[in-house]
Image: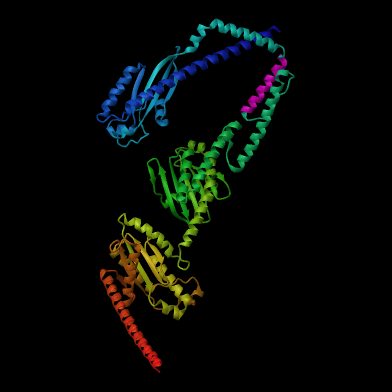
């Protein structure tokens, strides 16, 4: 029994001693932190006043040097120095400053004061290190080019030695402290002896439950040993464990239903894991809210690239959007910036998916497949995201080593959750674009209609301000009414489609084709002068004469749509801004040139000129004179009839 009491007394003494030491340590730590906080605040205030002085007009560098020396001489610190940012060093033509330690680098990164404590070996002292960033103000911009308000202009750094107060406090009150601890240990010993066995079991049960909870197991329960003072505590503790177990299980199930994750990537403790998952889901919600407002899929894909960059530090990243086996969008992202990709980049990615038994990291069986490939020359994670039957997105994440590849494979599951949210939005944008595109297209020829011409006119207007010229072609099939009357409307429609096919073959990818009327078409040629526009117009005219519909099978050979008949097209040409900066006026000018082509024999290209406008005005004037003459003759006839009626009426009255 004596040894039991002795053990309890020693245990109580040790526990209370440790607790006392802990209190002293926390008090000392608090005092040190307060000291550092006050010094950091004062140092930051002084530095900002000195280095952001709005009254500095000339010789700011000398002013900073004097201010720095003043601070250094007055501080009395062990060490004191000032560092410039790379932007200021480059602007002054001076060598870049080497950041001395982690504290200084952290101050540059966080834009806030940083500090550290280091115990000095074999002494009762600590080395305290403080680094305070200097934030660029408006006055800094007048002297330092390339600097923005809020950028890091430099930092003020210092270090000093502080005494460790724990031993000092202990020496001053050693007797009192030991007396208090001894008396408390005796009291604790007598209390514990009254129920030593039950208490020991409770301690062991409690330890097992706590250890289990830390490890993530909340199924362990604390057994009641009949000690009255602990009954309520044990009951409440078990209720807490039961509630935590049920709640965590329920939350875990619900999170799993909306969020795919690998538990090994998160904390083993369920509470911490759920906290991390909630933070992840919050980021996912913010991501979805952001991309829902984006109407261009290129912007959505850019946000996915940002997510990949957040979770994986890569050597470089390749992105490609493939539609109907054609690359419509793509880029290669490296530290030095973005560059275009080539067909070979996409073929390399596709070839890795086609090898026998690729290392599949993830496959949702809905079109998303992620694989990893490691060779002597390449360590890469490839993402293949099928949006529709015709559209596939590729992301190829190239890493520096196989070790990086293995460590980042788990992060892919996190990225998938973002892709899963983005995929329906990309599909919806594609659908909206398809509907919008169909509303701008002529059903027969698939050329743009006049509705889109009104929209495109605004684009032309903006590009004219950038000194871009435009060629305007107005086209009309010759004797089209005769074709319809002779061969029927089906053949007429076939001729219209044949003309649109011919135009598409003759113009460039960035040129626009519009169906302006029945058999009238407008072509807008971006970046063309009159000479280039005339060459393209002649090309269309000559190609249309010999153009024939392709025949897919024997049945088409006898089709009425393939009847051979003389066909030609007349074309009027105008140019913006040579003749006008208004697209509608320029279209009217091309129409006037088209009319001249019709009047002068058809099957030709006529360029608009001022003479054509003069000729039109003279013709309109002659027609107006003729109309006025007819109108005056009609008035005279009406007057004669009125006189005759009046004469007959007078005769009747006389009778």
* Residue 480: % across, % down: 41, 76
Q: Is residue 498 above or below residue 283?
A: below
Do we see residue 273 in this rendering? yes
Q: Which residues are magenta?
A: 196-214
Given the current orientation, which residue lies at the most extreme front position? 654
Q: Is residue 365 magenta?
A: no
Left or right of 367, for residue 453: left
Please identify the dominant SS of the magenta region: helix
Quadrant in the rendering for residue 255: top right
Considering every residue shown, the one lying at the far top of the view is 175
Q: In this rendering, would 220 be left or right of 337?
A: right
Estimate the x, y position of residue 98 in percent, counting from the top left: 34, 28
Give the image quarter of residue 264.
Answer: top right
Q: Quadrant of the C terminus?
A: bottom left
How far across and how far down the image is residue 306, in percent? Answer: 46, 42
Specify whether 249 is left or right of 531: right
For this rendering, which residue is in front, 410 or 458? 458
Q: Residue at x 58, y 38 (%)?
A: 262
Q: For residue 199: magenta?
A: yes
Q: Position of residue 646 (x, y in %)?
A: 37, 88
């Amino acid at each position: 029994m004596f040894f039991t009491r002795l053990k309890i007394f020693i245990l109580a003494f040790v526990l209370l001693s440790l607790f006392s030491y802990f209190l002293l340590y926390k008090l000392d730590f608090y005092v040190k932190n307060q000291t550092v906080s006050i010094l950091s605040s004062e140092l930051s205030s002084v530095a900002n006043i000195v280095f952001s002085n709005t009254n500095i007009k000339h010789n700011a560098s000398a002013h900073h040097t004097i201010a720095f020396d003043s601070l250094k001489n007055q501080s009395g610190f062990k060490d004191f120095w000032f560092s410039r940012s790379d932007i200021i060093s480059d602007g002054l033509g001076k060598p870049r400053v080497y950041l001395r330690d982690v504290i200084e680098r952290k101050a540059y990164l966080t834009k806030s004061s940083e500090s550290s404590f280091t115990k000095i070996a074999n002494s009762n002292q600590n080395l305290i290190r403080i680094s305070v960033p200097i934030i660029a103000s408006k006055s800094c911009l007048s002297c330092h080019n390339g600097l923005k308000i809020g950028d890091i202009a430099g930092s003020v750094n210092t270090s000093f030695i502080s005494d460790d107060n724990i031993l000092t406090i202990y020496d001053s009150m050693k007797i009192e402290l030991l007396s208090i601890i001894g008396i408390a240990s005796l009291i604790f010993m007598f209390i514990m002896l009254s129920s030593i066995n039950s208490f020991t079991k409770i301690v062991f049960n409690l330890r097992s439950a706590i250890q289990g909870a830390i490890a993530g197991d909340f199924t362990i329960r604390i057994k009641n040993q009949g000690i009255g003072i602990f009954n309520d505590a044990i009951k409440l503790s078990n209720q807490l464990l039961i509630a935590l177990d049920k709640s965590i299980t329920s939350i875990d199930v619900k999170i799993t239903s909306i969020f795919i994750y690998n538990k090994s990537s998160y904390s083993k403790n369920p509470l911490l894991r759920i906290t991390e998952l909630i933070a992840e889901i919050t980021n996912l919600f913010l991501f979805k809210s952001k991309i829902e407002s984006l109407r261009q899929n290129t912007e959505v894909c850019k946000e996915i690239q940002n997510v990949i960059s957040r979770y994986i530090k890569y050597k470089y990243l390749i992105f490609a959007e493939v539609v109907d086996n054609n690359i419509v969008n793509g880029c290669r992202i490296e530290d030095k910036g973005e560059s275009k990709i080539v067909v070979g980049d996409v073929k390399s990615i596709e070839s890795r998916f086609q090898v026998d038994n690729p290392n599949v990291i993830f496959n949702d069986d809905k079109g998303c497949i992620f694989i990893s490939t490691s060779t002597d020359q390449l360590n890469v994670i490839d993402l293949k995201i099928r949006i529709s039957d015709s559209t596939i997105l590729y992301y190829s994440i190239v890493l520096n080593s196989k070790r990086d590849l293995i460590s980042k494979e788990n992060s892919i599951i996190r990225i998938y959750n973002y892709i899963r949210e983005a995929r329906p939005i990309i599909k919806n944008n594609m659908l909206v674009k398809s509907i919008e595109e169909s509303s701008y297209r002529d059903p027969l020829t698939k050329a743009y209609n006049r509705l889109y011409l009104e929209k495109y006119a605004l684009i032309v207007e903006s590009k004219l301000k950038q000194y871009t010229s435009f060629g305007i072609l107005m086209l009309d099939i010759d004797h089209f009414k005769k074709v319809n009357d002779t061969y029927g409307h089906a053949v007429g429609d076939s001729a219209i489609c044949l003309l649109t096919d011919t135009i598409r073959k003759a113009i460039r990818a960035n040129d626009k084709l519009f169906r302006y009327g029945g058999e009238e078409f407008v072509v807008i040629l971006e970046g063309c002068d009159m000479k280039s526009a005339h060459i393209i117009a002649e090309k269309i005219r000559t190609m249309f004469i010999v153009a024939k519909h392709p025949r897919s099978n024997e049945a088409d050979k006898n089709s009425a749509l393939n009847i051979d008949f003389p066909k030609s097209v007349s074309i009027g040409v105008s140019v913006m801004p040579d003749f006008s900066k208004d697209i509608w006026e320029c279209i009217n000018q091309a129409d006037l040139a088209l009319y001249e082509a019709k009047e002068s024999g058809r099957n030709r290209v006529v360029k608009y000129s001022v003479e054509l406008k003069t000729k039109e005005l003279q013709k309109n004037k002659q027609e107006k004179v003729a109309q006025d003459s007819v109108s005056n003759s009609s008035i005279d006839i009406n007057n004669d009839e009125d006189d005759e009626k009046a004469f007959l009426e007078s005769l009747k009255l006389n009778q």
